[in-house]
Every structure is written in structure tokens, then in C-alpha cells.
């Protein structure tokens, strides 16, 4: 029987007793779903699996997304995250939940380490259910019915910086328009509430002027930085992290330059937040 070893009192568990080179049983899939919902992020060590096994494992939990940036050749469902001396880490060093700029953001992400620096390059995870619980009653009431505006802003900024013309920007805006999600979402499995805004992709609040929305968002973004609701994962080659984008945020530390860090991510389709 596999085991889940909690990493902190609030978030994170290491899974032992499963070999992901083999197809896992339906009972173990169900058990892993339970652990994911309970711990928000689950970790595996020493899983020397190829891209096909990575995708086979991810498909046990749903349909897979294709990210518009940098899919792996022959495996479009895999996003390659490769940083080194000629491609420094930068944009990942912000607290966020993946692809909240989609109308239906991802259920979860499964990231495997292919190459890691000797030290550095850890990923932190924050329990956004606990972040919501820590809010004072006045703020919880204030945000309970608000909707936040999410946008694929980092990619748009990159296009502008690289000199994209108005036509290309218009095509991008048409393909990736801003979307609305509740500031406080309800987990579709557990029914628990969590904060669902993040510094990377949330750009405003519907019907709230920016001079009022920005201070509130800044306050909400900062909740992820509270150590009491975090766990920190030190990567090793062939390690895997599987996180629930519906209930946690993550932060990839950019402290390993100029050393190499090569990761591959499969992402499972989700449903519109409510």
C-alpha cells in the first residue's frame, strides 16, 4: 500500500510506495486524488520515467492541456521549463496558480525534474485555503462576492518588449482575452473556500476602480507569503511535484543562475471556478 507522509501541518505530502513507470491501478488513482485534495501538493522521489510515462500518469486524472508557449517536440502536452546561463530564470519567481488566464484554468500540474542544480531551484507552495481562513472577517466579507480579472499579461509584456506590432498584439488579445474568476472560489471536490487571485495573472477587480482594487489585491497577494501556510520542496533529479491549482499557489525560486535547471510539466484541464 502506498503511503502519504505529511511535509508540514498544512500543506504537502510525500508519496511512497508507487512506481510510476507502471500503469497505476484505479484504486490508487482514487487514493492519489484524495491525497491531492487533502494536501494540495504531493511529491514523488526517484521516478525515472520518460515522457510517455509522464503523460500516461497525468492522463489518469483528466484531459491534458497544451500550453501556447514552448511545448515539447513530439509531446505537445509537455511544457519545457529550461533555464541556464543563456536563459536566466525570471518570470517564474512570482507566487501564482497556473493558467488562471483561461476560462477553465487547470485542475493540476505534474512537474518532473530532468536536470537540477546542486543547490537552489526549490519550489515553494502556499495553501490558499489557509490563506483565506487567515483573513480577518471584514476582508472575507469584502471579497466574498467580488470577481477578479485575469489576463495572460506576462506573455503580452514579452510581445511588446520584443517589438510586436499592433496587428500581432490584436491577434494575441483576441486569442487570450481577459477572463473573470471569483476572488474566493469553492473547491469542486472538498467544498472548501480559498483565495483565487495571484500576482502573475490577476490584473484587476470587476467594477472596482484600480486605485481601490490595487491595494486590496496587493493585500490578498501577500497572503501567500505567510510561512505558516507554506511548504518548500528541494528538487532532486527524477523528483515529481503534483499540485492542485484550485487550492494552492507556487513560487519557483530563481536563485541558481547560472546553473542549469530542466523541468517538464504536464497540466490537467480544469473547470470554470465558482
Image: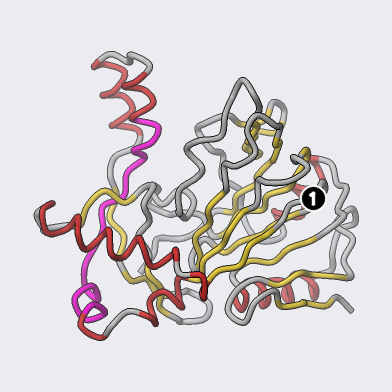
Q: Is residue 118 left or right of residue 127?
A: right
Q: Is residue 157 left or right of residue 145?
A: right
- Residue 106 location (% of width, % of height): 51, 55
In which quadrant will I find the N terminus? bottom right
Residue 188 or 194: which is nearer the viewer?
194
Residue 232 or 239: which is nearer the viewer?
232
Q: Is residue 144 magenta?
A: yes
In which quadrant will I find the C terminus? bottom left
| Residue located 65% across and 32% down the image | 82
The residue that disc 1 covers is: 236
- Residue 15 location (% of width, % of height): 79, 70
Q: Quadrant of residue 87?
A: top right
What residue range appears in magenta?
A: 139-156
- Residue 88 location (% of width, % of height): 57, 29
| Residue located 74% across and 52% down the image | 235
| Residue located 40% across and 48% down the image | 102
Amino acid at each position: 500500500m502506498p503511503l502519504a507522509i505529511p511535509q508540514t501541518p498544512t500543506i504537502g505530502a510525500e508519496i511512497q510506495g508507487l512506481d510510476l513507470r507502471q500503469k497505476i491501478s484505479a484504486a490508487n488513482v482514487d487514493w492519489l486524488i484524495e491525497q491531492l485534495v487533502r494536501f494540495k501538493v504531493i511529491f514523488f522521489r526517484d521516478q525515472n520515467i520518460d515522457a510517455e510515462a509522464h503523460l500516461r500518469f497525468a492522463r489518469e486524472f483528466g484531459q491534458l492541456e497544451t500550453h501556447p508557449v514552448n511545448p515539447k517536440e513530439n509531446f505537445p502536452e509537455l511544457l519545457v521549463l529550461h533555464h541556464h546561463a543563456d536563459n536566466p530564470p525570471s518570470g517564474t519567481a512570482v507566487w501564482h496558480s497556473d493558467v488562471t488566464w483561461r476560462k477553465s484554468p487547470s485542475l493540476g500540474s505534474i512537474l518532473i525534474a530532468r536536470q537540477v542544480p546542486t543547490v537552489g531551484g526549490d519550489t515553494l507552495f502556499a495553501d490558499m485555503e489557509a490563506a483565506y481562513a487567515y483573513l480577518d472577517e471584514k476582508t472575507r466579507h469584502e471579497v466574498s462576492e467580488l470577481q477578479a480579472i485575469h489576463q495572460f499579461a506576462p506573455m503580452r509584456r514579452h510581445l511588446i518588449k520584443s517589438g510586436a506590432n499592433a496587428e500581432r498584439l490584436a491577434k494575441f488579445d483576441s486569442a487570450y482575452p481577459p477572463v473573470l474568476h471569483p476572488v474566493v472560489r469553492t473547491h469542486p471536490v472538498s467544498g472548501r473556500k480559498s483565495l483565487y487571485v495571484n500576482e502573475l495573472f490577476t490584473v484587476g477587480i470587476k467594477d472596482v476602480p484600480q486605485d481601490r482594487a490595487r491595494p486590496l489585491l496587493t493585500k490578498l497577494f501577500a497572503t501567500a507569503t505567510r510561512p505558516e501556510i507554506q511548504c518548500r520542496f528541494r528538487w532532486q533529479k527524477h523528483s515529481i511535484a503534483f499540485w492542485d491549482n484550485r487550492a494552492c499557489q507556487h513560487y519557483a525560486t530563481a536563485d541558481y543562475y547560472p546553473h542549469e535547471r530542466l523541468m517538464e510539466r504536464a497540466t490537467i484541464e480544469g473547470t470554470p471556478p465558482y
